[in-house]
């Protein structure tokens, strides 16, 4: 069953080796499905996400996506430390050759054209934490725990992990979390500006769903380009970011959805957006 066929039949599920995909009413939910391993990261999970995300990007019926973990213990507890090959580098050359492929998941999440909401239901550790930082909104349960334990393990957060964290919590707190490997709770993450909301576990998915439904009701091209503007603009001097937005604004001003939004406002009716 294709994702497109799923999106036209509310409540359908597609199963992958390490995750589940549910699509209902323009909102997709990706569930990391390794609860027996606390949803630890694996090459298969990496591959499954790299397969699913482009499918969702191409599906015009899907407007927003929630990413969460199965069970109530973990979003993802990070790398599988029970595997003796985890974090081992035998030869620098072979590792560097694999690095672009291994880091592709971070680019795939950040560059995904539709909004992504992380619903963090427990441990978000190591790569599990870094993945949430690549999403657009983060909702955490009051049982959530975020941490980067790499330095105490003799390595470091790869693929810009320390910088990603600093952009959320600031340099001082990032230094503390990275160098000492300290964890913070969902409540602390909200206080530091790392997550948008911290809610009781029972309210986690309903809260994430409300965010997703609000996003799905907006003009999809404007949402996509606003996301791009913010993500790309953080890497640019303000003057260059502002100039790039002139071109985005010009393009959006010519879309059918922009005209529809303005007409609907003047006519005092609900708009209908087609992504055109």
Image (cartoon, grey):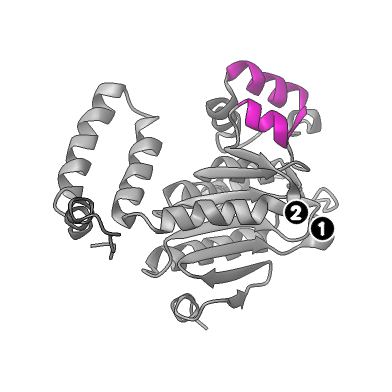
Residue shown at 57% from the left, 21% from the top? 170
Distance between the alpha carbons at the discs numbered 2 and 1: 5 Å
Contact? badges 2 and 1 (CB < 8 Å):
yes
Above or below for 275 versus 184 = below
- Residue at 50 percent of width and 78 percent of height: 6
> Compared with residue 96, is residue 156 higher up or lower down, i.e. above or below?
above
Q: Residue at x 60, y 51 (%)?
A: 207
Viewer-nearest residue: 257 or 58: 257
> Along the line of sight, which residue is nearer the eye, 197 or 145?
197
* Mark drawn on residue 40: 2
Mark 1 Cα shell of 10 Å, populated few (<14), some (14-19), many (≥20)? some
| Picture disc at residue 37 | 1
Q: Which image quarter: residue 15?
A: bottom right
Residue 107 vs residue 232: left or right?
A: right
- Residue displayed at 58% across by 18% down: 171
Q: Left or right? Give the position of 257 relative to 203.
A: left
* Quadrant of res 183: top right
Q: Is residue 190 visible?
A: yes
Question: Would residue 76 be seen by someone viewing this image from the given angle?
Answer: no
Q: Predominant secondary structure in magenta? A: helix
Q: Is residue 28 magenta?
A: no
Residue 140 x %, y %: 67, 43
Q: Position of residue 45 (x, y in %)?
A: 65, 61
Helix, strand or loop under label 2: loop
Look at the image and give the residue range highlighted in magenta. 171-192
């Amino acid at each position: 069953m294709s994702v497109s066929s799923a999106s036209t039949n509310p409540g359908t599920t597609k199963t992958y080796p390490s995750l589940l995909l549910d699509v209902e009413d323009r909102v997709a939910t990706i569930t990391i499905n390794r609860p027996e391993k606390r949803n630890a990261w694996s090459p298969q999970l990496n591959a499954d996400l790299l397969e699913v995300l482009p499918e969702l990007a191409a599906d015009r019926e899907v407007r927003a996506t929630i990413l969460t973990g199965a069970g109530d213990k973990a979003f993802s507890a990070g790398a599988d430390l029970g595997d003796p090959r985890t974090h081992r580098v035998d030869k620098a050359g072979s590792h560097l050759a694999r690095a672009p492929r291994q880091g592709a998941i971070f680019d795939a999440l950040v560059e995904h054209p539709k909004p992504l909401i992380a619903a963090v239901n427990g441990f978000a550790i190591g790569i599990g934490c870094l993945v949430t930082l690549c999403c657009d909104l983060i909702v955490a349960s009051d049982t959530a725990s975020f941490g980067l334990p790499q330095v105490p393990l003799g390595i470091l957060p790869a693929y810009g992990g320390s910088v990603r964290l600093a952009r959320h919590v600031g340099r001082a707190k990032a230094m503390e979390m990275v160098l000492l490997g300290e964890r913070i709770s969902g409540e602390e993450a909200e206080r530091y500006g790392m997550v948008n909301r911290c809610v009781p576990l029972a309210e986690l998915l309903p809260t994430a769903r409300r965010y997703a439904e609000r996003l799905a009701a907006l003009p999809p091209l404007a949402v996509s380009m606003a996301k791009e503007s913010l993500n790309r603009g953080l890497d640019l001097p303000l003057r260059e970011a502002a100039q790039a937005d002139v071109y985005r604004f010009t393009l959006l001003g010519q879309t059918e959805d922009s005209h529809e939004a303005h007409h609907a406002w003047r006519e005092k009716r609900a708009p209908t957006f087609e992504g055109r």
